[in-house]
Image (tube, rainbow, N blue to C red):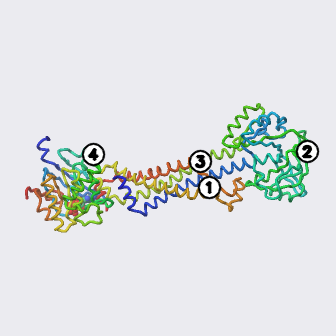
Amino acid sequence: MTSKIAWRNILRNKRRSLILIISIMIGVIAMILTDAFSVGMMQQMLTNQIGADAGYIQIHKSGYQANPSLKNSIADAGLIRAVLAKEQSSCNVSERLRTLGLVSSASNSAGVAIVGIIPGEEKKVTTIHKYIVKGNYLSENTDEILLSTATAEKLRVELGDKVVIMASRLDGSVGSEACRVAGIFETYDSGFDQTHVYIPLRTAQQMLGVPDRISEFVINPYDTKQTDLIALRLASALPHDDEVLTYKHMLPVLVMQIQVYDETIYIFYAIIAFALLFGIINTMLMAVMERTHEFGVDMAIGMSNKRIFTMILTEAIYLGIIGTAVGIAVSCAIFIPLSHSGWNLATFSESLNSLGIGTTIYPILTASSLINTVLIIPISATIGAMYPALRAMKLQPVEAIRTV
Amino acid sequence: MENKHIASEIVRVENVRKTYHDNGVPVDALRGINLVVSQKDFSVIAGPSGSGKTTLLNIIGTLDKPTEGKIFLDGEEVASKNRRELADIRLKKIGFVFQAYNLSPVLNALENIEFTMMLRGIPADERKRRGLTLMEQLGIGELADKRPNEMSGGQQQRVAVARAISNDPRLVLADEPTANLDSATAAKLLDLMEQLNHESGITFVFSSHDPQVIERAHRLFILKDGQIISDKKNV
Ligand SMILES: Nc1ncnc2c1ncn2[C@@H]1O[C@H](COP(=O)(O)OP(=O)(O)OP(=O)(O)O)[C@@H](O)[C@H]1O
Ligand SMILES: [Mg+2]
């Protein structure tokens, strides 16, 4: 009967109940979608950076991560290749030699990371080949180079134009090579674009005078969830003067950002919960005060304070549950299509590109976000109803009955 | 069995004073009331408007506390009881009938009657059975699923009476129950309460200045300016 009475009281002032349900619903949608888009955005930042350049696992000579110089490159890759050969069934591998240098045209020059890659293998571990906007990806020709649109503009070069790359060799002399612009790329990340050029591995080795050296192995597990496991396996199979790093080590800022997000999202939840709390306190207080006379009568006929409290809380719980259910339904209705098509934010593409996100965000709905919502929102609604319920409990029956 | 003295007297009011403070101005609503209501009494507290009838009834019904003096219900002093205990006493021993009926607008007639039984923890099917029987007895059997706003004043007041007696109270307190009813309807309602008084032995205490009500009193207290100026038995 308590639940029947609660229902009837909810239905009694449909407009007010609807307003409460809608505000709860908006809280739920805000919580779910904000989280879905934030998580989606960060995952995208992470997978973009992993995909474009870092890969999931890299092997270097110890100390390379701290000081990525030519001196710290791998002189004898034979042992590592042998170890990696055993992992053939679990991952793709490519080798690179990279250094900092200069790329120049007749009119300008730019400081960049010169990355020597094995074109065919690189395709299996990173996605740079997907970002070619003009010309072609590297072929087997040794004199080709890939530049970004930004670099090409800076150097005022076009496809097929010659550029010269230069970098220090081990002995301190300067190696240089003339290359032809074979392709122009443009990733989601303008900062990355301005600072990277790609040439064939052999060309890099030749320019730097280190025909056998490489700086890193890039390893992508077929199943990326196995990343840590494979990294561990590799680390134990390799001697200590090699370092095995996962993207978590290579992109520490981003990984930390995600961790920080996971914690700070609770501040956001708290803000929503508080807003909701005060909305509910306000509205329920109004609803309760309007019923002062009835509570007086209820008390006169012997209803205990506890029951009055419970009755009001029951109403809030019902409203909370309905609002949350509707909110989740609406969130899913918004989320499901957007998770397939993505949300195109072309208007903000400049800033999104500088963040390395890409212009289309694919939201990700996590179980923890759903669980948090389902817990936090109805609980806030219930807590919000406590103050009005306490006020109702404190009513003096005679005065309450006199109130009309 | 209880002590004979206590068993026969259900309400005892001793030297009760009640002073309200209306914006700081003290208003003496009751000025030393002494009265005893015995079991099965059909008693009326009469008096002009403002004489303190409602105040007295509320104090007897434990809805309000006297400024001074004592109230005994069934021989028990109520001043020492807390809110929860008082609510329990009202639930089990006292039925209220108000001038303005005061039925719950969200419940239909039967549910209004069931409500007090629900508060006592009576199971749903028994509540329903008893509620319907009561409604039949009071001649409102056909109103079970009507909401208060679909009933006349007389019908609502009968439902209110049914609600008041649904938990088999020892005492029914009715504050001007006929004030909003026409005299024919009022007469029927009074017949009903007289009948309940006769058949079930429920003690009634009314407040009223309606001659129809006063006419039927077995016991008449006349209140004026917060004092009882006349106490007559078997009028
Ligand atoms: N809450 C209150 N605050 C201040 N004064 C009050 C309050 N309740 C009652 N009074 C005053 O106490 C006196 C008695 O009031 P009470 O309502 O008991 O009279 P009554 O006999 O029931 O009158 P009526 O026939 O009009 O219902 C009146 O003077 C009234 O103004
Ligand atoms: Mg009165």
Q: Residue at x 53, y 48 (%)?
A: A372
What amino acid type should be assigned to the residue bearing mark 3?
A: Thr
Q: Position of residue B161 (x, y in %)?
A: 21, 58
| Mark 2 crowd level (few <14, some 14–19, many ≥20, 10 Å Cα) | some
Mark 2 C-beta closer than 8 Å to ligand 1: no
Mark positioned earlier in the residue sequence (1 or 2): 2
What amino acid type should be assigned to the residue bearing mark 2?
A: Val
Query: In the figure, A9 relative to A116: above or below?
Result: below
What amino acid type should be assigned to the residue bearing mark 1?
A: Ser
Secondary structure at badge 1 equals: helix
Q: Chain of mark 1?
A: A
Q: Position of residue B42 (x, y in %)?
A: 13, 56
What amino acid type should be assigned to the residue bearing mark 4?
A: Glu
**Residue beneath label 1, please?**
A339
Secondary structure at badge 2 equals: strand
**Residue beneath label 2, please?**
A174
Q: Which mark is residue B81?
A: none
